[in-house]
Image: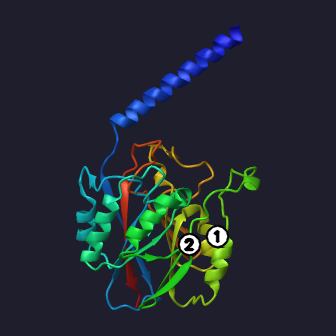
Amino acid sequence: MKRMRVFLRWVATVGVVCTGFGLFCFANNDTKLTVTSYEYETRKYTGSKDFRIVQLSDFHNHSLSYSNGDLLDIIADLNPDIIVLTGDFIDDQTRDYSMIQQMIASWKSKAIPLFYVDGNHELHAPENALKEHQIFDIWAVNMNEKRLDMGNGIVLSGLRDPGYRKKDELLTPFKPYEGDVPAQLDSLARGFDSSKLNIMLCHRSNLFDLIAAKGYDLTFSGHTHGGQVKIGNWAVASAFWETYIAGAYTKGFSRLYVNRGLGTSYYLPVRYRCTAEIVLTTIKSKA
């Protein structure tokens, strides 16, 4: 009986602490939208003007409004040459597609080229993803397992998210899931030109090592939401095996930018010390 009382006290204490922490996060929910700017200088880019790429990721049914402004207005002010979307703009909770429709209408009206790849939630909710694609494809280019020469030395490629583990793979859950990504990379390797600036769109940042090994110069990813809730160095909403959680990383000559995302998880609808993010990358020609 004594052990049971100790156990119940421990459970109650944990419950109180978790509840208190949850209430604290909700009370301090950070609803701002941050623009993070990077510069990437390379001899491979041959354009005469800087090339501005806006990356967006992990919208997850968020509104277009943030406490410091409207998403579409902020993007318009950045004056991008292209916009790239790295997955999870919908999920299995999506019922309202009007915000995605507004995005596409805005960027089409401004003639801003748009490119996208799927995330794990598109794979998890295929019916919702079909509706999303029908809206995207009015203006955007689907880059799942595709490569496109953009001119001026830039080649854009994309990976389709591998989705979820099969039943026979469930015994190895505590490591990044690769699925068919190695096969996708092998397929994209045909005709690969290392003299070009090769840019990869890939939802999951934990696939960066595979991408870097194939010679890609720059990768845009998301998926982690930056952890959403940061306590010191602990990114609460990220799996403990995640290496690339938010920000810029380098492996050899290959660089990775991990976007914290625009929205939040359905089961953790808060952000604390981890604002939503737009990534602006300016490609510069190195003389």
The total number of labels drawn is 2
The C terminus - image quarter: bottom left
- Taking the image as shown, residue 86 lies to the left or right of residue 110, namely right
**Marks 1 and 2: CB-CB under 8 Å?**
yes
Q: Is residue 87 visible?
A: no
Disc 2 crowd rating (10 Å Cα; few below 14, some 14-19, many 20+) is many
- Taking the image as shown, residue 209 lies to the left or right of residue 94, namely right
How far is disc 1 from disc 2 in space, using C-alphas? 7 Å
Q: Callout 1: helix, strand or loop?
A: helix
- Taking the image as shown, residue 248 lies to the left or right of residue 67, namely right
Q: Which residue is drawn at 23% across and 53% down?
A: 68
Q: Which color mode does the image show?
A: rainbow
Amino acid type of disc 2? Leu
- Position of residue 187 measured from the top left corner of the image (x, y, whole percent): 64, 81
Q: Is residue 153 above or below residue 212?
A: below
User: Please, which residue is most extreme toward the top here?
Assistant: 1
- Taking the image as shown, residue 76 lies to the left or right of residue 157, namely left
Q: Callout 2: helix, strand or loop?
A: loop
Q: Residue at x 26, y 64 (%)?
A: 72
- Position of residue 106 measured from the top left corner of the image (x, y, whole percent): 26, 70
Q: In which quarter of the image is residue 47?
A: bottom left
Q: Which residue is drawn at 71% across and 7% down?
A: 1
As rendered, which of 193 and 49 lies closer to the eye? 193
Amino acid type of disc 1? Val
The mark found on residue 159 in the picture is: 2
- Position of residue 202 measured from the top left corner of the image (x, y, whole percent): 53, 69
Q: Which of marks 1 and 2 is nearer the N terminus?
A: 2
Disc 1 crowd rating (10 Å Cα; few below 14, some 14-19, many 20+) is some
The mark found on residue 114 in the picture is: none
- Position of residue 210 measured from the top left corner of the image (x, y, whole percent): 64, 70
Q: Which residue is drawn at 42% across and 49% down?
A: 264
Q: What residue is pinned by disc 1?
A: 181
